[in-house]
Amino acid sequence: MIISEYPTENFMASWYVIRSKPRKESLLFHQLRAHGIEVFFPEIKVKPVNPRASKTQAYFPGYMFVHVDLPRVGFSLLNWMPYSLGLVSFGGEIPRVSDELIHLIRKQADTCEVKSPTAVLKHGDLVAIERGPFAGYKAIFDTTLCGTERARVLLKLLQNKRLPIDLPVNYLDLRQR
């Protein structure tokens, strides 16, 4: 957490929500910190299929929280900062976020972990195909492909040969085991 550079007397800081440009949250986070602004950018742990991929993901993609004395800092700094799409507003009013809500989000983000929909399956598990041209068939789960969107299953066909088929994960009944 970054301590603000502003004097503490008469400091009336509140939490606000700021939007970032798509997939630029980290860059905006560093810009805000460089200006001495306290930023809360909640992230959650993920288990990517690609070991080189990021192990964290934004809890609120495109959004983060800033703790500032808005009249002192000014709207233009936050609205025109590189990678910023400005403060979230409704009908021209910029709502404050309560300290209690920030505390709850911190607590929730610390305990949250996103798992792949296929995380419950292991190589060799029996699955049912619910959609697509092979709907109604049973197959053996092989692996997840391309993140969590596709899976490879082995379909038993003639002469007990297993044919590898790549399907969208949502074609599979993941409850079948």
Image (spheres, grey):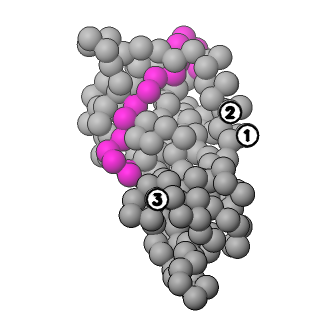
Q: Secondary structure at mark 3?
A: loop
| Inter-mark Cα distance, 2 to 3 | 38 Å
In magenta, the rendered stretch is 8-24
Q: Position of residue 30 (x, y in %)?
A: 47, 49
Q: Amino acid at mark 2?
A: Gln
Depth-wise, is mark 3 or mark 1 nearer the camera?
Answer: 3
Q: What crowding class fits label 1: few (fewer than 14 Cα within 10 Å), some (14-19), or many (20 or more)? A: few
Q: Position of residue 95 (x, y in %)?
A: 41, 14
Q: Secondary structure at mark 1?
A: helix
Q: Are marks 1 and 2 in contact (CB under 8 Å)?
A: yes
The residue indicated by pointer 2 is 108
Q: In the figure, 128 relative to 84: above or below?
A: below
Q: Amino acid at mark 3?
A: Ala
The residue indicated by pointer 1 is 111
Q: Please give left or right for residue 148 compared with residue 127 in the image.
A: left
Q: Position of residue 158 (x, y in %)?
A: 53, 84
In this view, the residue in front, 134 or 165, is 134
In this view, the residue in front, 93 or 61, is 61
Question: Residue at point 31% right, 24% down?
Answer: 75
The answer to which image quadrant residue 79 occupies is top left
